[in-house]
Image (cartoon, rainbow, N blue to C red):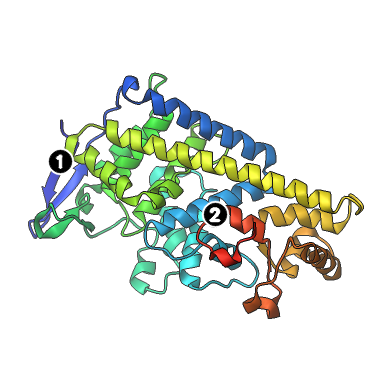
């Protein structure tokens, strides 16, 4: 069974152009498909019920952006991203954090100008401010040179993605497959198979992995399968990167998508379940904080700051003041009250700038923080 065709560039290197993949039968995947879709829909429902001005969804989008980027070599942690997204714009690697933040922002994109336009807008968002002038110049443009990845099974040790000369045809096939509607097939399966096609086309110079993982939740929302772009799987890919690439390669080599589809469905379900557990912990934490300040007036700034800190776990007083629409003094007084209660802390290295950390929230999301920094 064929999964695509090979072409040759002017140096005789093989370049792969994927065919439209065939759906596995429901018998081959139903035991994973139904639980995966149920978990995504429950996560979507919970987000919608609690998504205060998109802040909750942004929190989880940031987490997926961190993991999806880490699978490509990014070193920005969730805490780093939260610090970068304050008014201080600090991070151990500011350039890297800026790209991760752009990935998180991209979950809000739509396909109003077509799928190819969406891909190029996301690519521009990620790389237009790159320090490397060649990378910045290519932001928002399709590739003009073939791109490769290391693979010892190929001559010279590299596998070549679709030739730039074949991009128009390959992207047309991908677009038609992605946007097709057929009640006899699962939309989640369609988008996961679309992801397989996209990753083998690699239409832009760089960032194809992150962009491809963004497209699945965006298109699932576009096609009415979820109300929010939340069909995440970046965390699972980060955890099991070798399995992810092996599954992509298995589909290409065998021409059968069963193993790939099963692996991806497992990734989607595992990510949704992990996020549902985080949401449980987050809501329990908020209830605990509210209970602690039960003696305060219900309209007090500290109660509003509790709600804010749950979804913005790193902030300055200026950030809180602007978001809550209160005076600097009122925001600072509320932050001090939460600090005395042990709910906020100011890291030693940023005390001068009064960067507040909601350590317990960060501990729920950031699995890569030093244990000494985690609370409970």
In the rendered view, would you say 246 is above or below 371? above
Q: In the picture provided, is 248 more to the left or to the right than 275?
A: left
Question: Which residue is under mark 2?
Answer: 62
Q: Of circles 1 and 2, which is in front?
A: 2
What residue would you read off at disc 1? 5
Determine the residue positioned at 57% across, 73% down: 90
Mark 1 nearby-residue class (10 Å; few <14, some 14–19, many ≥20): few
Q: Residue at x 42, y 63 (%)?
A: 74
Q: Secondary structure at mark 1?
A: strand
Using the rendered view, name the quadrant where residue 42 is placed.
top right
Q: Residue at x 22, y 31 (%)?
A: 256
**Lateral position of residue 189 relative to residue 298, left or right:** left
- Check if mark 1's residue and mark 2's residue have beta carbons within 8 Å: no
Taking the spot 65% from the left edge, 69% from the top edge, the residue there is: 87
| Camera-side residue of 354 and 144 | 354
Quadrant that contains the N terminus: top left
Return the mark for residue 206. Answer: none
- Viewer-proximal residue, 328 or 83? 83
Q: x and y percent of residue 298 in the render? A: 89, 49
């Amino acid at each position: 069974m064929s999964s695509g065709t090979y072409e040759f560039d002017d140096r005789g290197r093989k370049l792969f152009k994927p065919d439209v993949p065939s759906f596995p039968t429901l018998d081959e995947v139903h035991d994973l498909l139904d639980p995966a879709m149920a978990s995504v829909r429950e996560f979507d429902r919970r987000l919608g019920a609690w998504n205060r001005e998109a802040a909750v969804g942004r929190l989880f989008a940031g987490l997926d952006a961190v993991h999806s980027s880490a699978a490509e070599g990014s070193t920005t942690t969730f805490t780093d991203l939260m610090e970068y997204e304050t008014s201080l714009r600090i991070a151990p690697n500011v350039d890297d954090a800026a790209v991760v933040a752009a990935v998180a922002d991209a979950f809000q994109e739509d396909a109003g100008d077509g799928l190819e336009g969406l891909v190029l807008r996301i690519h521009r968002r990620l790389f237009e401010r790159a320090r490397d002038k060649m990378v910045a110049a290519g932001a928002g443009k399709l590739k003009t040179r073939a791109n490769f990845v290391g693979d010892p099974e190929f001559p010279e040790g590299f596998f070549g993605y679709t030739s730039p000369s074949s991009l128009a045809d390959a992207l047309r096939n991908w677009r038609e497959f992605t946007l097709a509607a057929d009640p006899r097939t699962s939309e989640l399966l369609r988008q996961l198979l679309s992801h397989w096609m996209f990753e083998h086309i690699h239409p832009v110079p760089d960032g194809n992995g992150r962009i491809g993982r963004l497209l699945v939740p965006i298109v699932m929302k576009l096609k009415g399968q979820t109300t929010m772009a939340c069909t995440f799987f970046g965390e699972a890919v980060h955890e099991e990167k070798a399995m992810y690439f092996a599954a992509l390669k298995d589909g290409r080599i065998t021409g059968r998508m069963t193993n790939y589809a099963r692996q991806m469905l497992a990734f989607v379900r595992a990510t949704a379940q992990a996020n549902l557990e985080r949401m449980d912990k987050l809501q329990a934490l908020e209830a605990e904080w509210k209970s602690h300040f039960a003696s305060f007036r219900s309209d007090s700034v500290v109660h509003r700051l509790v709600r804010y800190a749950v979804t913005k776990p790193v902030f300055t007083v200026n950030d809180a003041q602007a978001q809550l629409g209160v005076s600097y003094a009122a925001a600072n007084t509320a932050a001090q009250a939460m600090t005395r209660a042990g709910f906020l802390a100011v890291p030693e290295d940023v005390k001068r700038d009064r960067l507040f950390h909601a350590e317990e929230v960060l501990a729920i999301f950031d699995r890569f923080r030093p244990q000494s920094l985690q609370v409970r």
